[in-house]
Image (cartoon, helix red, strand yellow):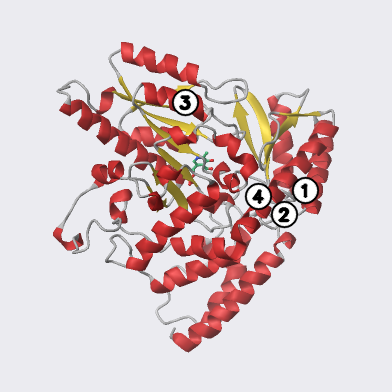
Amino acid sequence: MEGEEFRTAAREMADYIVDYLTNIRQRRVLPEVQPGYLRPLLPSAAPDTPDTWQDIMADIERVIMPGVTHWHSPQFHAYFPTANSYPAILADMLSDAIGCIGFTWISSPACTELEVVMMDWLGQLLGLPQHFLAASGGKGGGVIQGTASEATLVAMLSARTKTLRQRQQQGDTHTNHSTLVAYTSDQAHSSVERAGMLAGVLLRQVPSDQEFAMRGPALRDMVKADIEKGLVPFFVVGTTGATPACSFDNLREIGEVAKEFSMWFHVDAAYAGSALVCEEFRYLVDGLELATSFNFNPHKWLLVTFDCSAMWIKDANEVVDAFNVDPLYLKHDQQGQMPDYRHWQIPLGRRFRSLKLWFVMRMYGREGLQAHIRHQVALAHQFEDYVKQDSRFELILPVTLGLVCFRLKNENSEVNEALLKNINAGGVIHLVPAKIKDVYFLRFAVCSRMTQPEDVEKAWREVLRQTQLTLEKK
Ligand code: PLP
C-alpha cells in the first residue's frame, strides 16, 4: 500500500470507526462466540499473493466483530472503564506514522520533551504536589508507563535498590531481597502481589477496615511485628479507588507510617486518579504529599486510549539509579540535560504516547475533562438511587465515583451469582462481580464515554427483569 491508496483506505477506516462507535448500542455487548471460533474463519496460512484492502475491510465484520466485547458500548459496565476519544485516536495515528522509539532524548527530542511538559500539564490539572512536577525545578518528574502494573513494579524495584544500597553503606551484611517486606491492603490490585513476586520480596496484605480502607495503625502493627522478626520493611502501596469496591486507603496515615519506618510510599490510583481533575474529589488523596511516587491511568477514565499510565516520582534519580545501564550505542552528547526515559521504565523502547495527552487535554480543556468525570459520577448516583429505592437490594458501599457495588440483600452468594450469570447471558448489559470478606456482590461501573441517563435506566430495567427471573427459578 502506498500513499494514495492509504489516503483512500484511511478515509474508509475513519468512516468505519465513526459508524462503529455511533451505532455501538445496536451490537450485543458481550459476544456469543465459543473458544476457537476464529480459526475456521481464516485460511490455514498467510496468503502467497497480496489480498486487497477491500477484502480486509470486509473481513472485519465477518471475522473480528463477532468476537469483540464492546468495551465502549454504553451497555458495558464491567471492570473499570478503558478510555476512548477521537483526539486520542488521531494522536495514535500520528504516533504510528512518526514511529519513533523515544528511549533517549536524541532518539527523538520531541517525544521526550512533549512527555516532560505533558506530565507537568497533567500533574497541574490533578492538583498534584509541586515536588512531582519537573517545572518545579526540584528532583521530581513524570513519565508515561504502559500500565499501572509496570508503575508499581518500577516503584518497588527502585525502592528495593535504594534500601539495599543504604543498608550496604551502613555495613549491614544480613539484608538481602528475601528479608525485605512490602505492604499493601487486602483490597489492592493483584498487580501489587505480582510486583512482589517479580521483585522477589515478601508482600504482606494489611487487613482493611469496615470501609475497606487500609489504615495506619493496622499497617504499623504489621511493620513492627516484621522488624521484631529481623525483617526489613521497605515499601508500601496505598490505593485510591481499589478495584473490588472503589474504596480509598487513608493516605495520610499510611504516609506517616512510611515516614516513620523510612519506607517508599507508592500510591496506585489507576482508576480514581482521573477524578482529581475535579477539585471536589481531591479530599480522596489527602496526604498525597507524603507519597514517594504516584500513578494513575489516563487510559482508564480520562479519555486517553490505551496505553497511557501516568507516573510521577518525587526524586526521579531514585528510579534512574536503579535501572541505569549505559552501553556505548545508547550514549549521546546531550546526556543529563533532559530525561533519557529508558532509565525510568523496564523496556527500552517507548512510543510517542504524550501526543495523546496533548491532543486530549487541548481538545477537551480542563472544563471538558471535568464535565466528563462529573457526568459519569452523576450516572453512577442515578444507578445508586435505583438500588436504594428497591428494598430487595443493598449497597456494599456508598457511591463516591463511577462504581456502584450492590447485591440482593436477603439472598446468599449462590442467588447473587445466578443473578449475575443471568444478566450476562441476557446480553443486554455486561457486569462483573467481586467478593470482599466472603460477601459476593455485583459491580456496575459507568464505562463508556457515551453513556447517558437512558442507558443507566435501561441497565436497571434489565437488572430488575433478571432479578425476577432469578428469584422465580430459585
Ligand atoms: N490498580 C488498580 C487499582 C486497578 O483497578 C487496576 C486495573 O483495573 C490496576 C492497578 C492494573 O492496571 P493496569 O492494567 O494498567 O496494569
- Going by the numbered disc 3, the residue's amino acid type is Ile
Q: Nearer the viewer, mark 3 or mark 1?
A: 3
- Going by the numbered disc 1, the residue's amino acid type is Val
Pointer 4 local density, CA inside 10 Å: few below 14, some 14–19, many at least 20: many
Residue 456 image label? 1
On screen, residue 404 versus residue 171, left or right, reads right
**Sooner in the amino-acid sequence: mark 4 or mark 1:** 4
Q: Nearer the viewer, residue 164 or 203?
A: 164
Task: Give the residue drawn at x 50%, y 28%.
Answer: 252
| Alpha carbons under labels 4 and 1: distance apart | 16 Å
Residue 182 image label? none
Residue 254 image label? 3
- Going by the numbered disc 4, the residue's amino acid type is Ile
Residues at discs 2 and 4 in contact (Cβ within 8 Å): no
Residue 451 image label? 2
| Alpha carbons under labels 3 and 4: distance apart | 27 Å
Q: Nearer the viewer, mark 3 or mark 2?
A: 3
Q: Which residue is mark 4?
A: 373
Task: Give the residue drawn at x 80%, y 45%.
Answer: 462
Residues at discs 3 and 4 in contact (Cβ within 8 Å): no
Residues at discs 2 and 1 in contact (Cβ within 8 Å): yes
